[in-house]
Amino acid sequence: MISQALHSGSAVNSAGAVINGDVQHSSAAMQASVLALNRNFSAVHVLSVRRAFCLIFKELAEVIHVEDGRFVGYDFDAWREVSELRASLDERADHDDFIRAVNFEIQVPRIIRLLKYDRLPRNAVKFNRRNIFLRDEHRCQYCGRHYTSTRLSLDHIMPRSRGGPDTWENVVCACLNCNVRKGGRTPTEAGMKLIKPPVKPPRSPLICRHLAQRKYAAWHTFIGAAASITVE
Ligand SMILES: [Zn+2]
């Protein structure tokens, strides 16, 4: 039955539906993240669900699933069969995500293993706008209010015009009002105070946020202290 599914046109079309996002009731499931391990089981990336399915379907990766404390590897068709079985037996946990394609349901994997990739993770959390917003939890570091990304800006504590560097310790999230109010001054000159001193995060802020959620519990095994992996 597995080999039939492997070679049937419907399996290929179904995989295409997942990869192309042509699936129903699945937007939340498709927004999840997937941890990618290298061939030697070291965590190296965080990928989108679509990218993960693409790699699995091309046989460049396998799903890694925790079963009775062991990690079991599945290729696309085996994973699809297991997913259908779990769905039919109603063995789904609240935090499991399933996506429904035209003629089948498949569980969203939380971890995949890249079968042809053996490089190690890079050694630093990327210094970029997205990671600064995540580190500061989308809060203006002056007034303390939460904003969406579009209403936040990056503020150089020691202004750039006065030699302030682009570093984790000198750049914070600021709302547009606070940024304008501060202008080309230091916080002290502007009579403003930071809600906390900015520091370089020890690991990707996005990964920290994921680790706090139950559905990513399986990631803990692979993400120790050295979680400086890249996020897609
Ligand atoms: Zn503000």
Image (cartoon, rainbow, N blue to C red):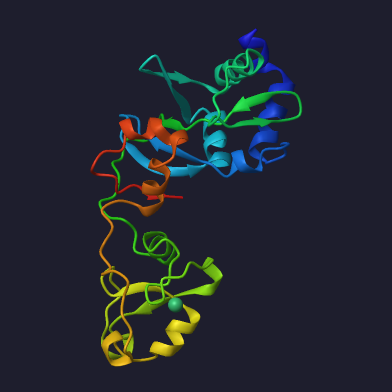
Q: Quadrant of ligand 1?
A: bottom left
Query: Residue 47 in the image: x percent, y percent?
Result: 48, 43
- Which residue reaches farthest right? 102
Residue lying at 47% horizontally and 33% vertically, measured from the top left: 110
Taking 140 as reference, is 63 above or below it?
Answer: above
| Residue toward you, 114 or 186 | 186
Q: Residue at x 44, y 40 (%)?
A: 213
Locate the N terminus and report the quarter of the image it occupies: top right
The location of residue 102, given as percent across then percent down, is: 76, 29
Q: Which is more toward the observer, 180 or 64? A: 180
131 over 39 or under it: above or below: below
Where residue 165 appears, x then y in whole percent?
A: 27, 78
Q: Where is residue 59 in the image (x, y as percent from the top left)?
A: 51, 27
Looking at the image, which is closer to me, 84 or 178?
A: 178
| Res 9 → quadrant | top right
Instruction: Please indicate, yes or no, whether residue 155 appears anywhere in the rendered image.
Output: yes
